[in-house]
Amino acid sequence: MTIDLSNISHISAELGTLPSSMVAWVIRPERLGEPEVAFQLEEVEGPEPGAFEVIVRVMAAGVNFNNVWAALGEPVSIFGSGDHPEFGHHIGGSDASGIVWKVGAGVTRWKPGDEVVLHCNQTSYEDPEVHGLDPMAAPSQRIWGYETTWGSFAQFTKVQAQQLLPKPAALSWDEAASYGLTYFTAYRMLMNRAAIQAGDRVLIWGAAGGLGVFATQLVQAAGATSVGVVSSAEKGELIKQLGATEYIDRREFAGMMRTGNETPEEEKERIAVMRSFAKRVKELLGDSPDIVFEHVGRATFPTSVFTVKPFGKVVICGATAGYTLDFDVRHLWMRQKEILGSHFANAWECTKANRLIDDGLIRPVLWRTMEFDQVGEAHQLMHENKHLGKIAILVGATGPDEGRTADGPGAIRAEVGA
């Protein structure tokens, strides 16, 4: 069935009521594969809010690699988790900005018409971990728009009320939809897990990537200093603009990258390059780093453990180069270093991080804004590594500058990458 998108930004229903159907980009288990094939436009029955839930009219959505995985069905299919068995389809999208359209029973803080951004952590209110430990420890913890359906690539989305945050007034809809997943992840890594302090020295891998651009700004906001590892001089100049003290072009030290298949002689050579890298980091920071911001994994982790100072911390949230890690553990125990795992953020951390955006202390970095009919194309670009930064998708918004209601710096438009 051909779907007319010429009027996608128009909603006939009144605020507080929902239309009988909506247009969405849908993945179904029978067509997993390349994103441009797996994502298909469909007209589907829209969601209704349950208790403590909210329906948001999506104005713009952000693209993340998690829905490349959802399309491919790799490393695991998402259709056995969350609410997918109940609905049988997946609407992706874990970042969004929009307008509260309808609220469910028990919601008192938000009302129809409120302009919001969304964070992507969902948990059951019945889990005791939510009420005293940390929602991220709850057994029900899920990433909305990946481990659940009703994501942001649709005219409407369904979320828990605790996912709502006030939209920063100085940002347009697409800018506001671009930062949540990566920024809030970086915030928890540095502010909570690593407990960064003023005066700390920080090494940031992939400093010009989706996580790194926020880590660099957060380090500066905390009164600390950073050196970022990047893949070009142009990206190095960008992170200096964002607050880095200096940068290292990783191509100068390519020999330190670990594959896990080195011969004894190759490993000896790799260690020599690693030592040279650690020496350069120490020279640029004035001392070895107190914190290493990790998300690369296999290729860099041995260097991270070696480079961080005694009693220092390596905080890691992912493993883009591989999740099976091996390193010389003597550098860990004999120097009493720490390895800290981190995963997304809780609502309180997201709230505090979002205030920094609203205050203009942290800025989103956005590469491209694409139209609603390009959702499949955007994920295909990401799958083939042909994108050059964060992509936002217009849904209810009609243009990339729509939605700004106050003066402010807005997003930085730049080509970025690790």
Image (cartoon, rainbow, N blue to C red):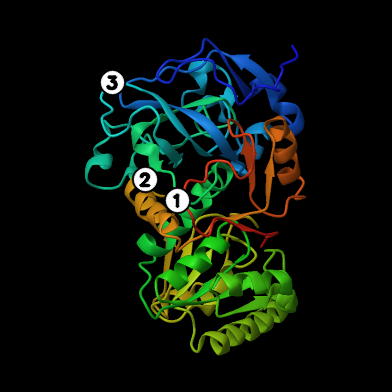
- Label located before the other in sequence (1 or 2): 2
Q: Position of residue 198 (x, y in %)?
A: 36, 77
Residue 375 or residue 253, whichever sits in front: 375
Q: Position of residue 164 (x, y in %)?
A: 39, 38
Nearer the viewer's eye, disc 2 or disc 3? 3
Q: CA distance from mark 2 to mark 3?
A: 25 Å
Q: From the viewer's perspective, tell me whether residue 131 is left or right of residue 5.
A: left
- Label located before the other in sequence (2 or 3): 3
All told, the count of numbered labels is 3
The relative height of residue 160 versus residue 88 in the rendered view (above or below) is below
Q: Which mark is residue 343?
A: 1
Q: Position of residue 385 (x, y in %)?
A: 75, 50
Q: From the viewer's perspective, tell me whether residue 61 is left or right of residue 16.
A: right
Q: CB atoms at circles 2 and 3 under 8 Å apart? A: no
Q: What is the crowding at mark 2: few (fewer than 14 residues within 10 Å), some, or many (at least 20)?
A: many
Residue at mark 3: 105
